Image: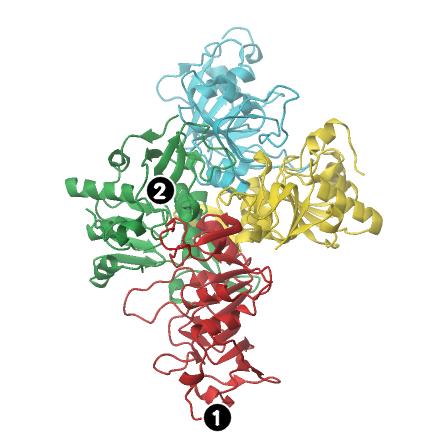
Chain colours: A cyan, B yellow, C red, D green
């Protein structure tokens, strides 16, 4: 380890999104959660064409239109104006969640407050205070063939987001199989965090100290290398 | 057969105190602003309807549409999935003050419960919410080794719907993603009231392109160039 | 009573259908069962416009097209070619039966093997022999706001079709509220057959002898009068 | 993304012995005759697939399409609502001889079970069939004082679908009442195989007019001027 802190070396949100995008196969149907995960769409590797689904009833939507050219009936789940790509389709909410719940999405990528080593996810409520809001997260975690999480490795206060057991209210039980963090790529297998990739600049010991449950290693841990931007 | 009526005021005249009202839209997309504002007008003039239970994906944004309905004190309970928005203060303040009840439902479960209400399915099982707070008190059953939560249908006395084109039989199309909850709510209400940007004669919509068949619709009122919540909010509008 | 038998005076199928058609209100959504009930559509009173639903996914279909002009993708539940009226709509089977099961039809008119005084209907199976077939009947009887039956008063062998209890396998329990027969119009109320109309040419006693359960009378019994054709 | 393939033979090449196969159509309307006949061709050449469980509203008519599939001895079990037709002899004889199993399902329950399979709903309650032979052995529950029967989802390994227009992403439209079970079966199969009278580029179908979104479709083969069961039967056709 160098004398730097993990804050100096960690990936930007865009870089985490870039890494997650590399795992999306050509032709995949993908739902990206509101916020951080939305950026994944920008980093599709050349030659691959994923089709993006939004819960409010569009398949194959694209980037935001130029300002002033929005059609406010053409929005995504984050209520941002979008455009259509050729081959798009509209459908109502029951059909949209039939796609989700029925296992037709290949990947859902969501944000997280906490992820537990058993695959439990907490991303909808920080507890009793304030107004609770759930949206489509609880449907997505039990529907997509693969549910991944995209997150900072620790909270702003430096507390682990990868934990033994979620302390916050659950979104879903045993649903997450891969976590892309600002420091590492970690699979969840048989109730354990399996470290697959980490930033070359961080040592295993420091990474473990920033993680709330044991990081298991099975074979080699690859270097997590992403472009600068 | 002609389901058209002349005015939004007439369209909402039958909605009484304590009614369960489904309101279409996802945020501002597909939200029937003019019907909601007509309901607010009636409340200002007559003190009614009040004590409404409203079913909508959200809880309003700014001071128009659903937010204005809540601000007017007409809503006793909200059934929704996501009571947040760019400006959710109207709902948030009433909620934190204990002046409005909230039933929080996962978005896909909300959609399916409404469809079930329309389709005569009193209950169904979903994996959604299993093991979470939102499943508390609900029956759980295993099918093929996997646990599921039993959810109940959701029906309404009235549905307020925003369509794009309607014919006189009540056949409807929608504009883009404004479809969202609207076709489901048409099915699940005892009386479905539609504002459409254009009303055409029977036969004016290709039978292949009908999204909501007229059997699910009771009244249609033409509202050309309907208002869009997002634009109203960007202009800082309030209603009334 | 005259010396004639009920066979001489009974209504034709078309006349029973005519009588049933008189009870269909303007603007009603109606499903007519395969066979005998289909004829009801021909006798809508002038000035009334009912909309006919067929289970396979059409609202507002009309008469058969001229021979040779059939589109065999445009058929009704009886698999006969039909045409469309202005304001028609197509939809898939799940939406079609959402209309049925969800209580959106005003009237369903079905044929019957037997109807019981408690409203039970048997119209799908004559027992263990042969190939059983049910179609949409079991959905229709529990969906439409009003379920009526259109039938001969007795079987070809002269046995009552209106009975105390159905002996044949049930289509639905307590679902029928009105029966249009070749001799009478009978409501089912509180577990009893209430005689509302009968052919003037048949006496109450003879009608009772052709009926397998008590015919109750509540006030006057109107004459069942239909056009000749 | 391009889901189109060259031939019906290639389209059905992956269907193995014992597979559960949903076949679209209501009678001959919307029945994918060419895909079924391609399956029969394969069986003649290779002896496979056999022992199929077929889900269809009916049980075939005459000696083409589903009737021919049954006549070829490829079907072990049929799940259907109405195994009668103008000429149902092929099925009837096998059924009475005990050579084919029949699961009889009310038509609306069949449609809803297929939709449930596609929508991830393992079970639901319906009033349909309550108190009848077809409800025997199924759980019953009361909701608001009325009894309902619990029905289970229905899923398939493959669906054979007849569409009107398809684009290369698998977005589909249908011709008139040929829609029937086709959109539901697209949702409920692990692999959905579509014959379309016309294949167009992505963008060739208005997003507002898509009936089956491509996410539910795996393979598309163009079959211009597809055969119609009713016309084949009127001509006394048999297959092969």
Q: Residue at x 74, y 47 (%)?
A: B7
Q: Residues within 10 Å of mark 2 (few under 14, many from 20)?
A: many
Q: Nearer the viewer, residue D204 or D12?
A: D204
CA distance for labels 1 and 2: 61 Å
Q: Which chain is indicated by disc 1?
A: C
- Is the residue D63 above or below the residue B87 in the image? below
Q: Residue at x 71, y 50 (%)?
A: B11
Q: Nearer the viewer, residue A66 or D191?
A: A66
- Is the residue A42 above or below the residue C41 in the image? above
Determine which of the numbered discs, if any, sits on residue D161 in the image: 2
- Is the residue A145 above or below the residue D127 in the image? above
**Whole-percent x and y of residue D219?**
34, 34
- Which residue is farthest right? B45
Q: Residue at x 83, y 51 (%)?
A: B46
**Whole-percent x and y of residue A112?**
55, 28
Residue B100: tell me if it is visible: yes
Give residue B104's quadrant in the image.
top right
Determine which of the numbered discs, if any, sits on residue C1 in the image: 1
> Is label 2 in a helix, a strand or a loop?
strand
Q: Residue at x 30, y 55 (%)?
A: D59
């Amino acid at each position: 380890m160098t004398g730097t802190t993990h804050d100096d070396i960690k990936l930007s949100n865009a870089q985490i999104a870039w890494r997650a995008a590399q795992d999306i196969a050509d032709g995949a149907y993908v739902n990206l959660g509101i916020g951080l995960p939305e950026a994944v769409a920008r980093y599709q590797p050349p030659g691959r064409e994923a089709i993006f689904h939004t819960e409010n009833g569009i398949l194959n939507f694209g980037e935001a239109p130029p300002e002033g050219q929005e059609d406010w009936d053409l929005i995504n789940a984050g209520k941002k104006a979008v455009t259509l790509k050729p081959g798009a389709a509209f459908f109502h909410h029951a059909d949209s969640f039939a796609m989700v719940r029925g296992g037709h999405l290949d990947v859902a990528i969501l944000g997280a407050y906490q992820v537990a080593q058993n695959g439990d996810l907490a991303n909808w409520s920080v507890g009793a205070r304030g107004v609770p809001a759930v949206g489509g997260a609880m449907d997505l975690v039990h529907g997509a063939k693969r549910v991944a999480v995209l997150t900072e490795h620790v909270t702003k206060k430096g507390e682990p987001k990868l934990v033994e057991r979620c302390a916050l209210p659950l979104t879903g039980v045993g649903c997450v199989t891969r976590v892309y963090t600002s420091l590492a790529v970690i699979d969840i297998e048989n109730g354990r965090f399996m470290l697959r990739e980490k930033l070359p600049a961080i040592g295993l010991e420091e990474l473990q100290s920033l993680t709330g449950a044991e990081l298991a290693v099975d074979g080699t841990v690859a270097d997590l290398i992403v472009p600068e931007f | 057969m002609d389901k058209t009526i002349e005015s939004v005021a007439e369209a909402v005249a039958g909605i009484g105190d304590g009614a369960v009202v489904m309101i279409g839209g996802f945020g501002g997309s597909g939200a029937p602003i003019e019907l909601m504002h007509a309901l607010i007008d009636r409340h200002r003039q007559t003190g009614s309807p009040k004590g409404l239970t409203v079913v909508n994906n959200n809880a309003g944004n700014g001071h128009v549409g659903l937010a204005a309905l809540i601000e007017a004190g007409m809503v006793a309970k909200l059934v929704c999935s996501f009571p947040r928005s760019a400006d959710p203060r109207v709902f948030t303040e009433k909620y934190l003050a204990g002046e409005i009840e909230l039933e929080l439902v996962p978005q896909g479960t909300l959609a399916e419960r409404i469809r079930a209400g329309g389709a005569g399915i009193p209950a169904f099982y979903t994996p959604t919410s299993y093991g979470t707070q939102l499943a508390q008190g609900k029956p759980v059953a295993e099918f093929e080794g996997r646990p599921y939560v039993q959810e109940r249908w959701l029906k309404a006395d009235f549905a307020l719907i925003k369509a794009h084109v309607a014919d006189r039989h009540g056949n409807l199309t929608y504009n883009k993603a404004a479809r969202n909850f609207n076709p489901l709510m048409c099915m699940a209400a005892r009386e479905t009231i539609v504002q459409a940007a254009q009303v055409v004669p029977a036969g004016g919509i290709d039978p292949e392109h009908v999204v909501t068949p007229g059997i699910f619709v009771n009244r249609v009122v033409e509202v050309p160039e309907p208002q869009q919540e997002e634009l109203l909010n960007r202009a800082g509008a309030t209603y009334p």
